[in-house]
Amino acid sequence: MECVYLIRDDESGLHKIGMTTNWEKRAKQLKVGTITTKIRVVPCSNSKKWEKVLHAMFKHKRIPQSEWFRITADEAIPKMEWLANL
């Protein structure tokens, strides 16, 4: 399943916006459920493109050279809902 996702690091509270073609495998790599929490997974075509769009929307809150952001779920979820409806 191709998708974009939002997870939260349980220790820092930072959020990661990413994309994958295999959410189950990626969730294991990111230790979702142990050190991170799944916030939202949005199935979509062309997930690489939509990941870039989401990164651009929050570039002012991005941790340099990473996919981690100082954002809240309340900030990101409406943008992801918009994406889901395209």
Image (spheres, grey):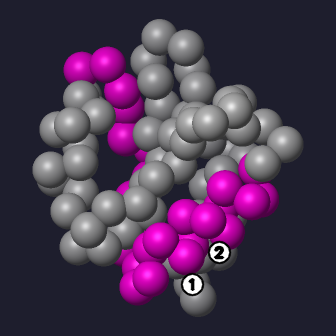
Reply yes or no: does residue 52 show up in magenta. Answer: yes
Q: Amino acid at mark 1?
A: Asn
- Label 1 residue SS: loop
Q: Is residue 5 above or below residue 7?
A: below
| Residue extending farthest top | 11
- In the image, what residue occupies the spot 44% across and 18% down? 10
- Kindly tell me whether residue 34 is visible in this rendering: yes
- Magenta region includes residue 19: no
Which residue is under mark 2? Answer: 82
Q: How many marks?
A: 2
Whether residue 81 is visible, yes or no, is no
Question: Badge 1, how many Cα within 10 Å: few under 14, some, many 20+?
Answer: few
> Do callouts 2 and 1 mark residues in contact (Cβ within 8 Å)?
yes
Front-most of residues 29 and 6: 29
Q: At which x and y percent is residue 1?
A: 23, 73
Disc 2 marks a residue whose amino acid type is Trp
Q: Nearer the viewer, residue 78 or 57?
A: 57
Tag 2, which secondary structure?
A: helix
Residue that label 1 marks:
85
Percent position (x, y) of residue 80? 59, 64
| Chain part drawn in magenta | 34-58
